[in-house]
Amino acid sequence: MQKSLLHSIAPYLAGLAIAAALFIYAGKIAYDPRPGALGPAIWPQLAILLLGGSCLFEIVRRLIVGNRDATGFLEAFDREEEPEQKDPVYPHMLIGGIVLMAIYAVAVPYLGFIFGTFLFLAAFMYVGGFRRHMTIWLTSILVTVLCGVLFLRIAYVSLPRGIPPFDRATDIFFHIPSLW
């Protein structure tokens, strides 16, 4: 086996080993099982299985095709050499995004998941340079509702409610009639 190939699969082997250890560790979550309900270990184990599966896929792909970069379906048929263009760099947007994520992590216990996520998504799109205001606010509403449904109604994840008066957004969300 070539040394460069071994170097290219080493991170994925480490990721696979970590995923295996985490899967075993997540299976040891102590809880009182309830009939007809999923246990608290199912969601972490599912995420860990996806992590391990993606690592395994990349290991096998690199062993079969060598150390080449992955290409999509269209790139495989595109034989023209394109002149290399340097992509623009926006360090202010990057720093702004990182600062917004840090603020979100600190503020979400106070604002609550629903209201905090709504504000974070809108602010993140503005920092990213998007300027269609109606699209920003509608997308923020839609993604917040979808995340709320996924985490609070389907996966039953306990997320921060927020402190008064911000906890009212979570209360309103739970009072919306359930269609799902």
Image: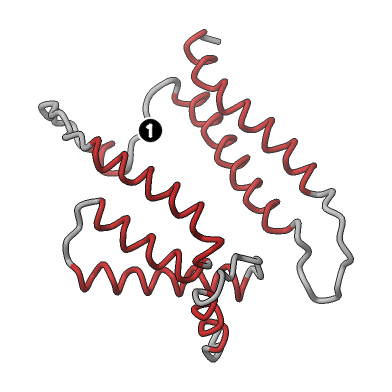
Residue 120 at x, y percent in the picture: 38, 60
> Which residue in the protein does label 1 denote?
70
Residue 127 at x, y percent in the picture: 26, 52
Residue 99 at x, y percent in the picture: 38, 45
The residue at the point 56 percent across, 61 percent down is 109
The residue at the point 38 percent across, 50 percent down is 100
Farthest residue toward the front? 164
The residue at the point 51 percent across, 60 percent down is 108
Residue 170 at x, y percent in the picture: 54, 77
Q: Quadrant of the N terminus?
A: top right
Residue placed most toward the observer, 107 or 52? 107
Residue placed most toward the observer, 172 or 46? 172
The residue at the point 66 percent across, 70 percent down is 156
The quadrant in which residue 84 appears is top left
- Left/right placement of residue 90 relative to residue 96 reads left
Neighbour tally class for label 1: few under 14, some 14-19, many 20 plus, Cα within 10 Å: few
Q: Is residue 3 above or below residue 8?
A: above
The quadrant in which residue 122 appears is bottom left
The residue tagged with tag 1: helix, strand or loop?
loop
- Left/right placement of residue 83 relative to residue 6 reads left
Q: Is residue 69 above or below residue 7?
A: below
Residue placed most toward the observer, 169 or 94? 169
Farthest residue toward the left? 83
